[in-house]
Image (spheres, helix red, strand yellow):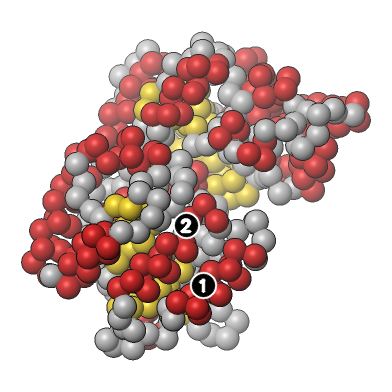
């Protein structure tokens, strides 16, 4: 019998990892006739299958006030505790309404009991599951102990209770093996490793008429070579190494294009990158105003493209991140059969690299050998095609929807006792 799945998070909107991966889970569930419904503080899902509760979003003014009073402090005022309690009670009531209105039979909690961006929501979810004994899966993307900003706090009781909670009817799914070990050590609960995936069984469609003019629209000439950095502009993305790579390649046709906006850590890093590129003679272009979540026209009538409109035009992907919880941009490069330069961040080195991918890898610094491997992939078409096809086959085995399908089957069977997929 198909289940009615309720996805719960702070937001399901945009291109963040939680929104993207939850949509993939829903697609796999839909393929097997399970119906998905959505609860969050910000949503881009269809209104007839979703419930938007503004207080569930981490940017709601009430949540921002609470966060200012519990993070970076070692003591909590009684008023803060009262407001956390009142808001968690309200959010719990809305969860009851959501489940009743859509007749939800299984909950999938997406990162909302993982990283404490919205403490009242995490408490509300924990109490709701305890009170209803509803079968639930907690899909964890990044834990609070992985983020420096949550190290000093006045929320020990909340973190122990709800981030994540320990309950017999709650199954835990994690996206990397280090998180699996940490969760077991810190919370004493088992989990299932479910890596992020893409639909490798169905290759991307060819460039359509809307996206044909991407290169000219972002100011590239016919002979220019597009090196794409498909990330936000934040220090952990290591974009200075992409600049160094282009400098070492030493060809004025190489243009470094950065797709996403400056993050919530200020503009200082953006300014530093601009100065580094100027000093190195590297043509760097920040095109965030031309990239959006959906295709549309801006106020001047110019096209807004999606990231997936941009990928097929790229000649190389740079992904020199210092840290990633998984690394979706890596999988997307493999999916579009584009060469990708990787910095050996911890999760890549432990979880992904042993699968056998062949690609240029740097280990905290660029060597001449790595740069020459990049150059060969760019200039030797038969070699490039051989490597890209090989990597695609590896990804098909380990990061396809069939892998996700098996994992979800196990999770749902564990909490319901029934074989569904």
- Provide the secondary structure element on which disc 2 rests: loop
Q: Is residue 364 above or below residue 166?
A: below
**Residue at horizontal 73%, vertical 20%?**
157
Residue 420, picture quadrant: top left
**Residue at horizontal 86%, vertical 31%?**
80
The mark lying in front, picked from 1 and 2, is 1
Q: Is residue 411 above or below residue 10?
A: above
Frontmost residue, 122 versus 387: 387
| Precedes in sequence: disc 1 or disc 2 | 2
Q: Is residue 400 above or below residue 251?
A: above
The single residue placed furthest to the front in the displayed view is: 368
Q: Position of residue 356 (x, y in %)?
A: 19, 41
Frontmost residue, 218 versus 104: 218
**Residue at horizontal 22%, vertical 69%?**
375
Residue identifier under label 2:
238
Left or right? Give the position of 179 relative to 126. left
Please say whether residue 293 is visible from this viewpoint: no
Q: Is residue 384 above or below residue 417?
A: below
Residue identifier under label 1:
276
Left or right? Give the position of 387 relative to 31. left
Question: Callout 1 environment at 10 Å: few (<14), some (14 to 19), or many (20+)?
Answer: some
Q: Position of residue 290 (x, y in %)?
A: 50, 75
**Residue at horizontal 30%, vertical 73%?**
249
> Alpha carbon of mark 1 to alpha carbon of mark 2: how far?
13 Å
- Provide the secondary structure element on which disc 1 rests: helix
Can you say which quadrant of the picture contains the N terminus? top left
Question: Callout 2 environment at 10 Å: few (<14), some (14 to 19), or many (20+)?
Answer: some
Left or right? Give the position of 61 relative to 255. right
């Amino acid at each position: 019998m198909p289940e009615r799945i309720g996805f719960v998070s702070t937001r399901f909107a945009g291109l963040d990892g939680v929104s993207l991966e939850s949509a993939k889970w829903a697609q796999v569930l839909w393929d097997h006739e399970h119906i998905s419904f959505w609860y969050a503080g910000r949503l881009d899902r269809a209104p007839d299958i979703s419930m938007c509760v503004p207080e569930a979003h981490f940017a709601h003014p009430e949540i921002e006030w609470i966060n200012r009073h519990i993070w970076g402090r070692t003591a909590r005022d009684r008023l803060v505790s009262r407001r956390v309690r009142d808001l968690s009670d309200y959010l719990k009531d809305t969860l009851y309404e959501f489940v009743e209105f859509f007749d939800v039979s299984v909950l999938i909690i997406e990162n909302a009991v993982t990283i404490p961006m919205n403490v009242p929501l995490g408490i509300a979810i924990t109490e709701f599951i305890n009170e209803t004994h509803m079968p639930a899966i907690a899909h964890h993307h990044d834990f609070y102990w992985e983020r420096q900003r949550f190290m000093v706090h006045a929320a020990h009781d909340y973190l122990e209770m709800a981030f994540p909670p320990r309950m017999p009817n709650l199954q835990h799914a994690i996206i990397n093996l280090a998180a699996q070990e940490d969760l077991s050590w810190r919370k004493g609960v088992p989990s299932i490793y479910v890596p992020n995936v893409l639909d490798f069984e169905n290759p991307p469609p060819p460039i359509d008429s809307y996206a044909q003019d991407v290169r000219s629209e972002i100011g590239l000439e016919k002979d220019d070579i597009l090196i794409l950095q498909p990330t936000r502009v934040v220090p952990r993305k290591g974009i200075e190494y992409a600049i160094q790579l282009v400098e070492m390649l030493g060809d004025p046709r190489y243009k470094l294009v950065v797709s996403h906006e400056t993050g919530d850590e200020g503009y200082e890093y953006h300014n530093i990158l601009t100065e580094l590129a100027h000093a190195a003679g590297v043509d760097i272009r920040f095109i965030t105003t031309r990239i959006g979540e959906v295709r549309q026209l801006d106020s001047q009538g110019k096209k807004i493209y999606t990231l997936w409109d941009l990928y097929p035009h790229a000649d190389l992907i740079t992904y020199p991140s210092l840290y990633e919880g998984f690394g979706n941009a890596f999988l997307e490069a493999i999916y579009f059969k584009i060469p990708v330069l990787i910095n050996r961040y911890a999760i890549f080195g432990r979880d992904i690299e042993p699968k056998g991918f062949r690609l240029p890898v740097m280990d905290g610094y660029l060597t001449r050998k790595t740069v020459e491997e990049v150059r060969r992939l760019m200039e030797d078409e038969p070699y490039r095609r051989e490597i890209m096809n090989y990597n695609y086959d590896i990804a098909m085995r380990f990061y396809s929807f069939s892998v996700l399908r098996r994992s979800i089957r196990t999770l749902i069977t564990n909490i319901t006792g029934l074989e569904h997929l």
